Amino acid sequence: MSTLTATPVARYSEAIPTTMRAAVYRGINDVRVETVPVPEIGPGEVLVKVAVCGICGTDLKKIHTGSHSAPRIFGHETAGTIAAVGEGVTNFAVGERVMVFHHVPCGRCYYCRKRTYAQCPVYKPAGVTAGFEPSGGGFAEYVRVMDWIARDGGVVRIPDDVPFEQAAFVEPVNTVLKGVKSLNLQPDETVLVTGQGPIGIMLAAMAARTGATVLTSDLYPGRHVIAAGYGLRNSIDAGTEDVVARTKAVTAGRGADAVIVAVGVNALIRTAMDAVRPGGKVLLFAATQHCEASFDPGAVCMDEKTLMGSYSSSFEILDEVTELVFDGYRDGFDLTRLISHRFSLEDAVEAIELASNPSESSMKILIEHNTTGHGA
């Protein structure tokens, strides 16, 4: 159990229990809902009572591949209420509704100066935990937010009229907007987004905000129906249509100016490289596990096609992201419509199983507890 016990918690809003329920990763494909200690906080730290936590594909890959040691408590798309603050915390108060980032860059190192924040040595370790090795911890009732996260912008207040469910999208929207910005899309360009799960839809929606023409592809027609609710109507049924041929047909034979691969399927890299025009860009967004994949090096060299990646969030764009998510809830960008299933923490194993085996009817899956919706 990773805790600090030397300094007492400064203030409490309610009696905080000594134990809590959590979905604990015990090994490959082995997650168990167990009773564990509530993490204690130290100076500069914050304890958050979790209301909701989205299930992210990166957590699923860790669970299924054993890339991370056990035991751990995953979950990083977290929103909840501050239950206690440690000594010296003056910028947050008990009872405030917040969402929490589990990574924050230092802002000073070589990588930060080069604006590759996800490679910052301070950014890489998770700074939020529900116990064990820090890993986000959102699949638990309480999380401990470490001092540099609380101090350097990793805790974001949620407006009173925005529900926890919408606020939980701040972190994933940050990651997708960062990826789209890296493409520098122009209004006269065409971008193809392969995969229309929740991340694919958000990527396509962010790409559409640039004024570019957005094509979307997916095997499930039902997902295109959901995407259309976000203004994404140039769809390609990947189960019945040739994605590359269709893309070239609507771009005078050139191919897309950019292709975003929003599914972690290596075979789609070749599809993307074939669908992008000479001189265009292919962005790998979901390739979050190290492995080998094949592609045509001549397409990179002679056709000058760029193969690139984008990973995690950027604090440079945090203000823009929070405006998108919070104001968007009021003004037509309601991301809670992407949520297809809600599970209690006690049913977290079932939730993870469903998220690991997506179907046409499953989109964003949330673990919800300790929530009254819009209230604190």
Image: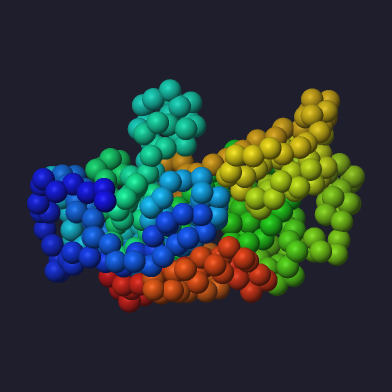
> What colour scheme was applied to this rendering of the protein?
rainbow
Query: Does residue 236 sit above or below 184 in this rendering?
Result: below
Query: Does residue 4 sit above or below 280 in this rendering?
Result: below
Q: Nearer the viewer, residue 25 or 188?
A: 25
Residue at image position (24%, 60%) is: 37
Question: In terms of image quadrants, where is residue 99?
Answer: bottom left
Q: Position of residue 234 (x, y in %)?
A: 76, 61
- Drawn side of residue 366 relative to residue 132, left or right: right
Q: Nearer the viewer, residue 75 or 95?
A: 75
In the image as oriented, which residue stretches furthest toward the bottom?
372
Residue at image position (73%, 68%) is: 220
Q: Is residue 338 visible?
A: no
Q: Position of residue 196 (x, y in %)?
A: 67, 60
Q: The C terminus lies in which quarter of the figure?
A: bottom left
Q: Position of residue 175 (x, y in %)?
A: 52, 48
Residue at image position (59%, 57%) is: 199
Q: Nearer the viewer, residue 27 or 61?
A: 27
Residue at image position (86%, 61%) is: 241
Query: Does residue 286 sit above or below 114 in this rendering?
Result: below
Query: Does residue 78 sit above or below 373 in this rendering?
Result: above
Question: In terms of image quadrants, where is residue 360?
Answer: bottom right
Question: Count of labels shown?
Answer: 0
Q: Is residue 30 visible?
A: yes
Q: Position of residue 329 (x, y in %)?
A: 47, 66
- Drawn side of residue 159 relative to residue 26, left or right: left
In the image as oriented, which residue stretches furthest toward the top?
110
